[in-house]
Image (cartoon, rainbow, N blue to C red):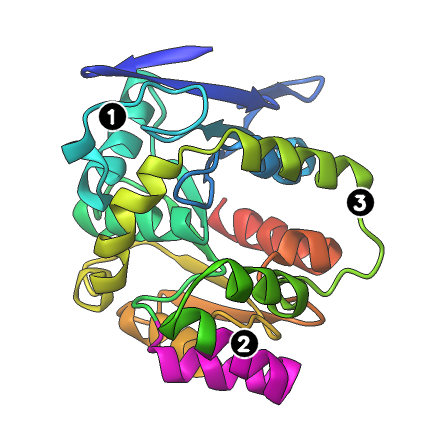
Amino acid sequence: MRVLIGEVRLFIEVFGQEWVFDGSTFQRRPVLIGLHGGPGLDGSKLRHQLAPLADVAQVVVPDQRGHGRSDRGSVETWNLPTWAADVKNLTDALDVEQPVVLGFSFGAGVAAQYASGFATHPRGLILVSTSARPPTSPEVIERFRELGGDEAAEIHRRDIEAPGEETAAEWARLCFPLLSRRKDEDPFLAGLEAWRFENQSLDVNLHHGSEAKETDLLSALRSVRSPTLILIGEHDPLIPTSHANELCDAIPEDLASLELVPDAAHDVFSDNPAYSYSRIREFLADLR
């Protein structure tokens, strides 16, 4: 379905119930808003990954403005403040009070921007596979060296300094596999990833790329007033451990807790779903 918020319609899918009858009375579950990664990808994969939480929350996953089946909006609205405002406007349109907002990777940046700009609105915040600011090129090169050896670090360095078809192919061969620890490929997810890649909005990705390199949410995160769970794969090549700690420390009043997901890289839901889901379930239970 599509929901009109201002001048755009956002495509959403919903899993589970907010109000559940237990035989004698109605119990209210939290509403979990899931924000997909990217930019330039839709919410298909995140919907698949968050659907198992529909037994403890009502899960709502939109395609963000400019992505997937949602309206594109104008180019000048493809930025974090607008995407964050869309979260607030979407929950208002759905009459959702105090949602729990989960963001994955790029979506976590949107979630952090939303939670800082509308500090009293969310009941809770879950930031997955993200950092408050982009690591520097030397930091990421060394992270690839730590996890993949000298050859992976050298290929990543070349792809940064002189990108081209050859470096892209080498990066895909040696560096891309480091984004996941999963040994046996899930055929369903593989098909879903291929569809997402073919249908991604590359112009959104290219437009936001320059902004993303300059994004620094450290000061904004000091405005967060919601309990926050941070999930980072302990083997994520894109996020040095120091950046995970920095993200956690930026949120005031001991509201944030950091979980390094064992045996997981960037996609913690695919690499270690049992651990990731259990921590989210505990977090939602504590909020209640």
Residue 56 visible? The answer is no
Q: Amino acid at mark 3?
A: Asp
Residue at the disc numbered 3: 186
Residue at the disc numbered 1: 89
Where is residue 78 shown, x and y percent of the image?
Answer: 23, 37
Q: Residue at x 61, y 23 (%)?
A: 16
Q: Whole-Å distance between the Cαs marked 2 and 1? A: 43 Å
Where is residue 211 shown, x and y percent of the image?
Answer: 21, 54
Q: Is residue 204 left or right of residue 77?
A: right
**Mark 2 or mark 3, which is nearer to you?**
2
Where is residue 198 shown, x and y percent of the image?
Answer: 56, 32
Q: Whole-Å distance between the Cαs marked 2 and 3? A: 27 Å
Q: Residue at x 33, y 36 (%)?
A: 203
**Alpha-carbon neighbours of circle 1 within 10 Å: few (<14), some, or many (≥20)?**
some
Residue at the disc numbered 2: 155
In the depicted structure, whether residue 106 falls above or below residue 24: below
**Mark 3 or mark 1, which is nearer to you?**
3
